[in-house]
Amino acid sequence: MKKDKLIKLRILAGFTVVFSLLVCFVDRARIGPKGTSVGFSHINGFFRNIFKFSNALYIITNILGYLAILVCLFFGAIGRLQLFNGKSLKKVDRNVIALGVLYIVVILLYVIFEKAEINFRPVIMPGETAPEASFPSSHTMLALTVFCSAPPVLRKYVKDRQIRKIISIVLYVLAGITVVGRLLSGVHWFTDILASIFISATLLYAFYIALDVIRPKKKIHK
């Protein structure tokens, strides 16, 4: 089973890499502000003409991004408290450690793509004089990875099943609202959002595999 999951992870990761490369080279045209070029220009231009800039949605999705950061800080505080009390990294919940690794990877990808500047925003943001890097949508990537990775870890810290279920649903809904809101806000190209979904799906699948590996094995009673 684990081998099958690893094969699926490689396929998902490979598809994500190929899609990102295609955005760099396929159908590039200068349709962005100040003549910036964009891959898949026809499909991106189509969605750009539908979803005009919405400052309200931009602000809402930014707030949700800050909320995702608070979730990161929450689990970071748990890990730090466990480390302080246990005086050893071995005493820290391995699920929390896995979350920390996931967060670090997201940060590294954010830095890498900020430097790469594959695409620039379809609009020049208020107060700015030049378009900013937009590929992939960092808010979408952050929301999906943080909100969708938290529920399986909460099992250990929220004992009440009903409350845990409600929290999980809220987190998944917030992730969905961020994705849709970011697209409708008009601050990203359609392929920016798609790439973020693919990247997040790859990271989350790897994270779920990691949880399966570190989960204590059930003893079989004979």
Image (cartoon, rainbow, N blue to C red):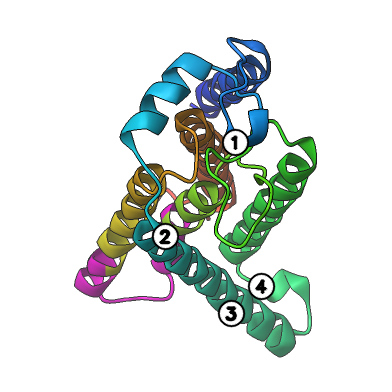
Which residue is most to the left? 162
| Mark with earlier residue (4, 3) | 3
Q: Nearer the viewer, mark 4 or mark 2?
A: 2
Q: CA distance from mark 2 to mark 3?
A: 26 Å
Q: Mark 3: which amino acid?
A: Ile
Q: Which residue, given by chain and number where applicable, does mark 1 sit on?
A: 33
C-alpha gap between disc 4 and disc 1 = 48 Å
> Could you tell which of marks 2 and 1 lies nearer the N-terminus?
1
Q: Are marks 2 and 3 in contact (CB under 8 Å)?
A: no
Mark 4, mark 3: which one is toward the viewer? Answer: 3
Badge 1 local density, few (<14 within 10 Å), some, or many (20+)?
some
Identify the residue under disc 2: 61
Q: Amino acid at mark 2?
A: Thr
For the residue marked with disc 1, what is the amino acid? Pro
Residue plotted at (59% across, 19% down): 39
Residue bearing the label numbered 3: 78
Earlier along the polypeptide chain: callout 1 or callout 3? 1
Which structural element holds mark 2? helix
Query: Dot 4, how many residues are within 10 Å of its Cα: few (below 14), some (14-19), or many (20+)?
Result: some
Which numbered marker is on residue 92? 4
Check disc 1 and report its element: helix, strand or loop.
helix
Q: Amino acid at mark 4?
A: Val
Q: Earlier in the sequence, mark 2 or mark 3?
A: 2
**Residue drawn at the location 72% of the way across and 40% of the way down:** 113
Say whether residue 159 is magenta. yes
Magenta-colored span: 148-166
Residue 37 image offset from top left, x and y in percent? 65, 24
Q: Is residue 32 or residue 15 the one in the foreground?
A: 32
